[in-house]
Amino acid sequence: MSLPHAILTALLEKPSSGLELTRRFDKSIGYFWSATHQQIYRELGKLEQAGHIRALPSEQPTRGQKKDYEVLPAGREELAAWVTRPEDPRQIRDPLLLRLRAAAVVGGADMEAELVRHLELHRTQLAGYLAIEERDFPPERRVSREDRLRHVVLRGGIELETFWTKWLTDTLFELTAPALDLAGEQTPAPGPPPGPATHPDAPGEPSRDA
Amino acid sequence: MSLPHAILTALLEKPSSGLELTRRFDKSIGYFWSATHQQIYRELGKLEQAGHIRALPSEQPTRGQKKDYEVLPAGREELAAWVTRPEDPRQIRDPLLLRLRAAAVVGGADMEAELVRHLELHRTQLAGYLAIEERDFPPERRVSREDRLRHVVLRGGIELETFWTKWLTDTLFELTAPALDLAGEQTPAPGPPPGPATHPDAPGEPSRDA
DNA sequence: AGACCCATGTAAGGGGTTACATGATTAC
DNA sequence: GTAATCATGTAACCCCTTACATGGGTCT
């Protein structure tokens, strides 16, 4: 039940039409909640029926005409209530991890190209987030509560992509490196894993305290 | 389209009944692909109809009786094909990040307790993964291709949970700390964020290379 | 007139979540 | 015999994804 609240949030920041919302979901909001235009139109209809939003007045005919929505007080209250409602984190459900596990069972498949491809995608995404951070969150924009909240959300995206690039890099290294200790030198030492950019820091054992 | 492949993987590792699969999904497989027993029974039916698995012979009546399934060659082929099929990473879709963003818009809500709660959950999950790593992946179990694959998958879970605990710790600190540079000292310095465990290292700027 | 974009929408199907139903086995 | 547990299943609902449909405007 998060999509309606994502839309309410976006509409509170700026009243918009369905397509404008779609574009904004492709940009800032979509960094942590993606949605297609079909989802958005359907949800806009529901929200309007529930009395949470309304279409701004316009004399145009309905079909093919832009329709702007704004949030009503009931919608704002619903959003405020949802923000404080506890909700457990979701279970991990990642196809790439699953495919690696399956590869261990069926054998034979070399997933290196796919891992490199994902690494590139995550690197690109990470670069995009960092550009946004530099543009929108200079130190003086990290003071107010609102700015800080927005910034930590972006930080979440940045650190998630950092995790993926690091894990993919380590995984590529692990899967292409020879068995160091048990077998002497069967394959030529592959060095750092493939991929255009530099190698991040060493794996780094997480603390065993918890 | 990943659930059937998750089931095929689990069945290749060991033929099982629906409930056994459910339990295994609550343990090792569920670390990267969760599923309920209803999903699993429905999917087992589909896989059997598709000729990918079959129920091991048994003279029992159908209702309430254990039914073990095994993978047929067609199922193994389907799984091997799926492993090499490219598939883009999913978009982020995280309710907690969304709620923080919404909190910036509606204001007033203090999410500190919720953040602490999530931090505890992720710490527990992380500790569980680390215990598995220590038990199942000593250095001598990281040699064969299969073991390495299984290990990097677990590493993914470990580092994901590490990311969450770090981000939550940083976020709690950021949201409870006073405005350092612009406002002198309005609130008593809160020190490290709440929560039982120690504070990990500083935020740590990721490299700006990409 | 045709191509192209903007904007809103419908339809079908897959997948996940929650609640409930039913039969068999075991323990008290 | 009643309760608890094991085991399999049904039903309803919601969400997401993909493909397609329709109408309006603009450019050439």
Image (tube, coloured by chain):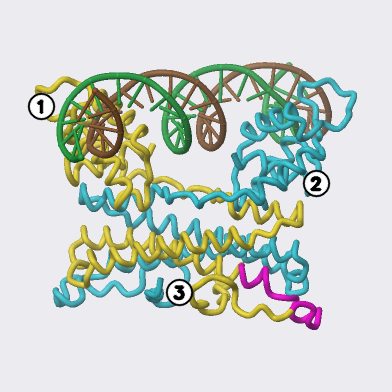
Chain colours: A cyan, B yellow, C green, D brown
Chain letter of the residue carrying label 3: A
Please check whether the numbered discs 1 and 3 fall on a single chain.
no
Chain letter of the residue carrying label 2: A
Q: Which mark is residue B57?
A: 1
- Disc 1 is placed on an element classified as loop
Q: Residue at x 82, y 31 (%)?
A: A55
The region drawn magenta spans: B172-187
Hey, which quadrant is residue B35 in on the image? top left
Query: Looking at the magenta stretch, what is its main secondary structure?
Result: loop
Query: Which image quarter holds the C terminus of chain B?
Result: bottom right
Q: Amino acid at mark 1?
A: Pro
| Residue A186 drawn above or below residue B8 | below
Q: Is residue A177 left or right of residue A92?
A: left
**Badge 3 is on which residue?**
A200
| Residue B16 drawn above or below residue B190 | above
Chain letter of the residue carrying label 1: B
Q: Residue at x 30, y 67 (%)?
A: A174
Q: Which mark is residue A14?
A: 2
Q: CA distance from mark 1 to mark 2?
A: 62 Å
Cβ atoms under marks 2 and 3 closer than 8 Å: no
Query: Which image quarter holds the N terminus of chain B?
Result: top left
Query: Which residue is nearer to you in this view: B181 or D3?
Result: D3
Cβ atoms under marks 1 and 3 closer than 8 Å: no
